[in-house]
Structure formats: C-alpha cells, structure tokens
Image (cartoon, rainbow, N blue to C red):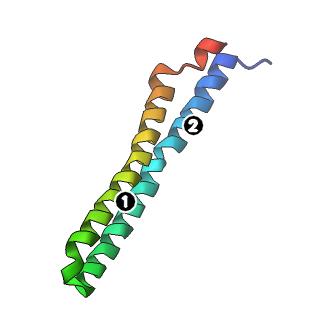
Amino acid sequence: MQMDPRAFVLGMSAVAAGMGALAGLGSGLGQGIAAGKAAEAVGRQPEARGAILSSMLVGCAVAETCSIYGLIIALILLLANPLVGML
C-alpha cells in the first residue's frame, strides 16, 4: 500500500496550521498577565500611571504580532498551501 504524497502534505499542513493557531493562546495569556501586573503597579504607584500604561501597551502590541503571524501562517497553509505545488 502506498500513501498519496498530496494527502500526506495536506494532512501535515493541517497539523502545522493547528500548531500555528496555538500562537494566539500564548500571546493572549501573556497579554492578560501583563494587564494584571500593570493594574497592580498602578495601584501601588498611581503617579507613574502614564509610564506603566505606555510600557504595557507597547508590550501587548509586540505580543499581538506573534498571534497575527501564527494566524497568517495557518491561513496560508490551509487555503493557499504552496507545498502542494512542489509535488
């Protein structure tokens, strides 16, 4: 019995797309932790609110790019799949 290479590539692409989508889980957890710590810091030092919030927002923006890249890679593997054309 021989496996169809196209089916194998499509199956592994689906697995890789699922792993790429997990990037959103990590960044969501990180952003939640950062927001919680920022709220604690503002509670301790209300006069430093502006600096704390700006640092948190920059950090959350950087973390969000990771999940966006994971989503883009997952969509490419599921919809456009350039690997099938190499067979």
Residue at screen point 35% across, 65% down: 32
Q: Is residue 45 above or below residue 29?
A: below
Q: Nearer the viewer, mark 2 or mark 1?
A: 1
Crowd tier of the residue under label 2, counting other residues whose Cα lies within 10 Å: few below 14, some 14–19, many 20 or above = some
SS of the residue at dot 2?
helix
Residue at screen point 26% across, 87% down: 44
Image coords of residue 16 (percent x, y): 57, 37
Residue at screen point 62% across, 31% down: 12
Q: Is residue 75 above or below residue 37?
A: above
Q: Is residue 10 above or below residue 85?
A: below
Asked which quadrant contains residue 52, the reply is bottom left
Would residue 28 be found to the left or right of residue 11 on screen? left
Image coords of residue 18 (percent x, y): 51, 41
Q: Earlier in the sequence, mark 2 or mark 1?
A: 2
Q: Nearer the viewer, residue 52 or 5?
A: 52
> Which three-letter amino acid code belongs to the residue tagged 1?
Gly
State which quarter of the image contains the C terminus.
Answer: top right
Name the residue beneath numbered marker 1.
Answer: 59
